[in-house]
Amino acid sequence: MINSTSHNRLTATWLLIVLFLAFIAHLKSAMATIVVPTADHHLVRQAAAIVQGQVTRIESHWDAGKKQIYTHITVQVEEVLKGELAQTELTIKQAGGTVGGLHSWVHGSPEFVVGERVLLFLTANSDGTPRVLGLYQGKFSVILDAQTGEQIAYRNPRPEGVRVLGRSSANQTAPGSSLSMRPLAGFKAEIAAQLSVERIPSSSAKSMHSTPVSQGVVESRDEFTFLGSPSRWFEPDAGLSIAMMMNSQGEPSAPGSGFAQIRTAYQAWSTVIGSTFRFQDGGFTSAQGFSADGVNAISFGDPLGQIDPPQDCSGTLAIGGYFRSASETRAINGQTFFRILEGDIVFNDGWQGCGFYEDFSNLAEVATHELGHVLGLDHSPDVNATMYAFAHFDGRSAALQSDDVSGVNFIYPKSVSTNQIQYADVNGDGSADSVNFDISGGAGIWVSLASNTDSTLPDMWLQHGPSTPDQIQYADVNGDGKADALYFDTLRSDGVWVSLSTGSSFTAPDNWLQHGESRPDHIQYVDVNGDGKADALYFDTLRSRGVWVSVSTGSAFVSPEMWAQYGPSTPDQIQYVDVNGDGKADALYFDTMRSNGVWVSLSTGSGFTAPENWLQHGESSPDQIQYADVNGDGKADALYFDTLGSNGVWVSLSTGSGFTAPENWLQHGESTPDQIQYADVNGDGKADALYFDTLRSKSVWLSLSTGATFGNAILWLP
């Protein structure tokens, strides 16, 4: 369920916003309750008492011992359908309410208004006081049909902040399901018939204390209802992470006690490229349940008895919530947010054997959804989103969808640069992986491994100090088939530092080559002599205007030798790829200053031949063209991203001795040339198009090559 917020600006500085495991919409309050709808006959069987009456009084109380707000709703009892009550007045105790400037709400809680007539299914709190069974599911309003004069029992089918599992609609009419509206007389007759047939004992009602003891500050209210406002954490704005801790008892029925599933969910939200938000795994804690104890805790097994147990795998799966400031706000992207100060999640007990905890991906999806609420997201209207109001349980685990990414990017925006992401096969499986050099909050290299038409959640492979993204490139310099990380330290040592790939991380860096004063864009790494090891090629546009090659020995770069001489140039005019399929990278110079042609100098293994014009262009900029083998024939082709005119990607295939006339393989909207790169991500030998949309979604979109065109774009890296 979702959190609620108070518009009552008073003096207290905290708000408790309690959520139940459900799914909310993006820019409302953002905590939720997840519910598997309970059939009416289960409510009848589980209830300690069922009563009809009228609400006469509502009072909220602060419980200092439990660090919670509770609201007492007094009902004048008109009829007892189940149970034995000694008094005609009954006071129930519900978590949540408002005292001073402190507001608390459990999403999915039943709502009450003074003077309202109600039909209630009741159970006992841990202290023996009565409460409504199953949150909103155990409370019906009794209203009058103006046309027929008939009394109707009405229940809100889906309150704000409730996510529903296991049903496509809260109004299903299949046997055993629950209706949101039905004639009161008929409903009461069904209850009586079930009680008569099943002879359900009702003695448990006698043990309930009908009048809860009031403690601390008391405030009278006319209603007990949900109030909502957007909230977010402010720490990420300063580059700080939000530490979450798990109760060490875990969930016995879940694989690995559920800890890995929670950590996977942390990782999903913490590696969104365009967001500053990061969860931190704070380890284990003895803290449990909901309380303002200063610990962001995830508990299992409902340790404080705050949730009704399930019946027949239906009921409340988990609840969650957070405390927020009553007054501190901040405007982000034109939206005002209250400050979240603490968050908790509690998984219920009694769900063993129902398939929720036992399945790794199901629990990971639920945890991801709940943590999305903890960071401030509401339910998404997108049916594919993990933050949608219904669970999918389609094997997605902790995977985020495009609307989830848009939501967290909106609440926690971060500037991104196109050159922070590159693509290289770092684990040697033949597919290009996504490598993100994230310089925010402590620079690190984050790797998302490609897996056919999917990519894994990012893992940090190497930690860096202060850097810029253009200082690093990736190439296989030792010939083991795995791309290594090469850092050109132009800020300090002017050396090329190599971190070899182990297939699961990068090693500590070694200095392979020393340079004088340089710029990062002067150097590139490709195999120019065909020995399977990438060499260092330095285009010295500041002095000699020559291309200097330092061949890789597998453990260092040798002293540089000049392989080619050019006239006045800029470093971005030259690239190196194998255009004739002989296994040696050639030099391709895009002469945008004079001829507007692509001039190719083939590699002989010990030098470059005299340049020949392979492709003529109109007025262009060097960054508009790249080279990659898009049809799988072993020869790199020319790909021109025409951002000045058609906004299309035009492909000129290599024949081995020239480039063919260009054809439009992919159409884009308004873009910049640096947003697109080409790499083979599915291992079919054909380079695909990867578009890093830094202007809108801040995500990477993949268009697979068919060998004759690029396919429709799919979300590749959130």
Image (cartoon, rainbow, N blue to C red):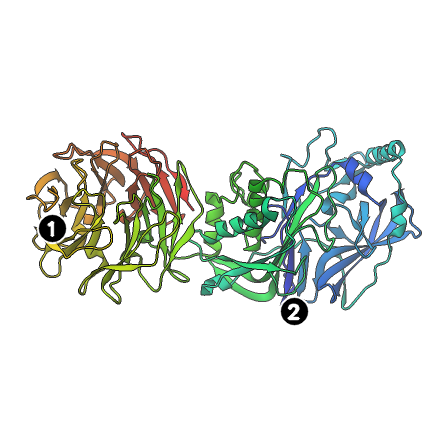
Residue 298 seen in render: yes
Task: Tell me the amino acid under the disc marked 1.
Answer: Met
- Please indicate, yes or no, whether residue 118 appears anywhere in the rendered image: no
Q: Position of residue 379 (x, y in %)?
A: 56, 46
Tag of residue 692? none
In this rendering, the answer to whether 386 lies above or below 169 is: below
In the image shown, does 639 or 108 lie closer to the viewer? 639
> As displayed, is residue 140 above or below residue 412?
above
- Relative depth, front residue between 615 and 679: 679
Q: Position of residue 686 (x, y in %)?
A: 29, 34
What residue sits 79% from the left and 49% below the top? Answer: 116
Camera-side residue: 272 or 656?
A: 656
- Extreme left residue here? 610
Q: Quadrant of residue 691?
A: top left
Mark closer to the chain start, 1 or 2: 2
Q: Residue at x 13, y 48 (%)?
A: 592
Read off the residue under disc 1: 593
Check whether the beta carbons of the residues at disc 1 and disc 2 lie within 8 A of each other.
no
When asked about the image quadrant of residue 584, the answer is: top left
Left-right relation of 622 to 193: left
Label placed on residue 12: 2
Q: CA distance from mark 1 to mark 2?
A: 66 Å
Secondary structure of the residue carrying numbered label 2? loop
Q: What residue is shown at x 81% (from left), y 39% (from top)? A: 44
Q: x and y percent of residue 43 in the render?
A: 78, 40
Q: Would you place residue 201 above or below residue 278 in this image?
A: above
Three-letter amino acid code at disc 2? Ala
Report x, y in % for residue 337.
54, 60
In this view of the protein, which residue sits in the foreground, 370 or 108?
370
